[in-house]
Image (spheres, rainbow, N blue to C red):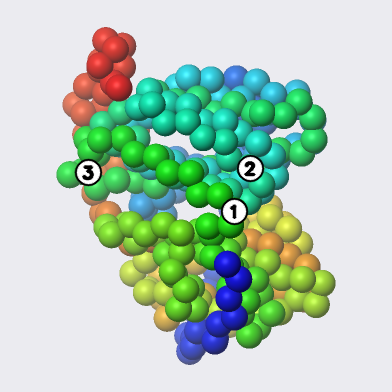
Amino acid sequence: MNLTATAAPITHPRRVERLIAGQGTRDGAGVKLTRVLTQDLQRRLDPFLMLDNFGSDDPKDYGAGFPDHPHRGFETVTYMLTGNMRHKDSAGNEGLITDGGVQWMTAGRGVIHSEMPEQVDGVMEGFQLWLNLRGTDKMCPPWYRDIPRGDIPEVNTPGGATVRVIAGASHGVQGAMQRDHTEPLYLDIHFGEGGGQFTQALAATHNAFVYVYRGEMTIGEGAQAVPRQRMAILANEGDGVQLHASGAARALLIAGRPLNEPIAQYGPFVMNTREELMQAVDDFRSGRLA
């Protein structure tokens, strides 16, 4: 679905508070990735807990995948730009994510799942975002949804951007997913060779960041330059976001309503208290997680 929309009026665009360079690491069974949103930024970017960017054309960097591992207390959003990844979990869900598709999983009270490549060569590239759950929802039943590429609305804006609306809404178009309490906005914004401008209305109370993964952009009234593979944390002010590119570029704009609750994390478990974390670990070791 591809739509043409009118511009979102912005009178006071947010400025860039600071730029973040991700940390190179390996996760799962050795998958090479860049951790863009790290644990020390969780309070600042509440309700978001983590953002990983994986991408390589070398199967040694991704071939071993992410074998069975547990989660409790949050949601995972996997967005595949290129490649094929198979999801299976202990709640009986299974699906294949392919080019341009999304998998949205609510771990809730607990799930054990695997994410394994279904390709032996070629490029595999994408993102995984961790979205927190409020304390009263952390022990909800697990839930899962596959969202194929064709089910994600695309909007052509007057400024020359093409926007994939994964969650929330942009320019009057509702995205593929909605969440009541965290109100996430998840946009993939594309500019062609001619560049262009994009605006998005956004409440100043919502935490927001932009991750540029192709080309480069400038953000806000100060025209802060943001190079490739940098995350721009946006100051909590004004009435929206303004992006500009002079050439081909792509970026994620992610924002959400903070939960303002304690965050207690131990690896794949994210709860509100240390006692709840200890219970999660005990439940996993005792086979009661899923």
Residue 235, position in %: x, y?
46, 69
- Residue bearing mark 1: 149
Q: Secondary structure at mark 3?
A: helix
N-terminal of the pair, mark 1 or mark 3, is 3
Alpha carbons under labels 2 and 1: distance apart: 8 Å
Quadrant of the image occupied by residue 152: bottom right
Q: Residues within 10 Å of mark 3 (few under 14, many from 20)?
A: few
Residue 137, numbered circle: 3
Q: Amino acid at mark 1?
A: Arg
Secondary structure of residue under mark 2: loop
Q: Looking at the image, which residue is at 35% across and 27% down?
A: 91
> What distance separates the C-alpha of mark 1 from that of mark 3?
28 Å
As drawn, is 216 to the left or to the right of 5?
right
Earlier sequence position, callout 2 versus callout 3: 2
Compared with 10, 206 (above or below) is: above
Question: Which quadrant would residue 106 be assigned to in this image?
Answer: top left
Amino acid at circle 2: Thr
Amino acid type assigned to the residue bearing label 3 in the image: Asp
- The answer, for residue 22, to whether it is visible in the render is no
Left or right of 227 on screen, residue 90: left
Front residue (pair 259, 17) = 259
Residue at the image position 22 percent from the left and 22 percent from the top: 279
Query: Circle 2 is placed at which residue position?
Result: 98
> Whole-percent x and y of residue 130?
44, 43
The mark nearer the N terminus, 2 or 1, is 2
